[in-house]
Image (spheres, rainbow, N blue to C red):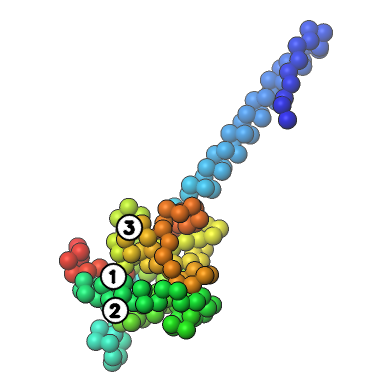
Amino acid sequence: MQQKFYSNTSQPYWIKPCRTVVLLCTITGFMLVIAGCQSSRSSSGYRMESKYSLKNRKLHISCRPYGTGPAVTCPLPLKITQQSLDQLFSSIDENLGTRYRFGGASPDGFDCSGLVLYLFQKNFSMILPRTASDLAALGSVIPKNSLRPGDLVFFSNEGRNIDHVGIFVGQESFAHAASSGVKFNRLNERYYDNRYAFSARLITTEEQAD
């Protein structure tokens, strides 16, 4: 509604000062609302990154380096060969189109964390936690502009809890178990860009290892 201002010299002397106060309060309130919106929209990723970047991040994971036998503790990021990384991508391709199944962690059906669990166990003999939220506490947090293929990308619908995870494959794309099945999407798609929280590195090739 358009606000109207009237000029009337017959109005009491206190009308104009009151209007000034009201106008200033209105402007101040409007600026606070804008600041609040900017904070909530731009800082959701920061809050999430901070929450999962605390000193209790887990930098070790259980794994079976030879595929069988007792589990041992391995440091993160786990050093792998380029061949193993290529096998990961082949495994993703093999499972494209697999249906979504809540709680699923096999080619019969995957949910988002189940897909990561299955692929990392199959290709790297890593024993990962079951939920996206628990996965988000592993490894080092990686800036979005420093992503490497194999890094995990995490998403949050409401900016408070991690509720989705995928595997970065390069070219701004990631693989994940969506409600429509295992597929590729791009990080810069509006839906995922708005819900992106942060990324973490659990594996690194011998050539990329710092």
> In which quadrant will I find the C terminus?
bottom left
Residue 202 image-quadrant placement: bottom left
Give the alpha-carbon distance from disc 3 to disc 1, as whole Å: 18 Å
Q: Position of residue 178 (x, y in %)?
A: 49, 69
Q: The residue under label 2 is which amino acid type?
A: Phe
On residue 203, the disc is 1
Give the alpha-carbon distance from disc 2 to disc 3, as whole Å: 23 Å
Circles 2 and 1 in contact, beta carbons < 8 Å: yes
Q: Counting other residues with Cα less than 10 Å from the Cα at mark 2, is it few (<14), some (14-19), or many (20 or more)? A: many
The residue mark sitting in front, 2 or 3, is 3
The residue singled out by tag 3 in the image is: 171
Q: The residue under label 1 is which amino acid type?
A: Ile
In the image, residue 66 above or below residue 119: below
- Residue at the image position 34 percent from the left and 81 percent from the top: 121
Q: Is residue 118 visible?
A: yes
Q: Which residue reaches farthest left?
A: 207
Q: Is residue 133 visible?
A: no
In the image, residue 81 above or below residue 160: below
Q: Secondary structure at mark 1?
A: strand
On residue 99, the disc is none
Relative to 83, is 142 on the left or the right? Answer: right
First in sequence: mark 3 vs mark 1: 3
Q: The residue under label 3 is which amino acid type?
A: Gln
Q: Which residue reaches farthest bottom?
A: 69
Q: Secondary structure at mark 2?
A: helix
First in sequence: mark 2 vs mark 3: 2
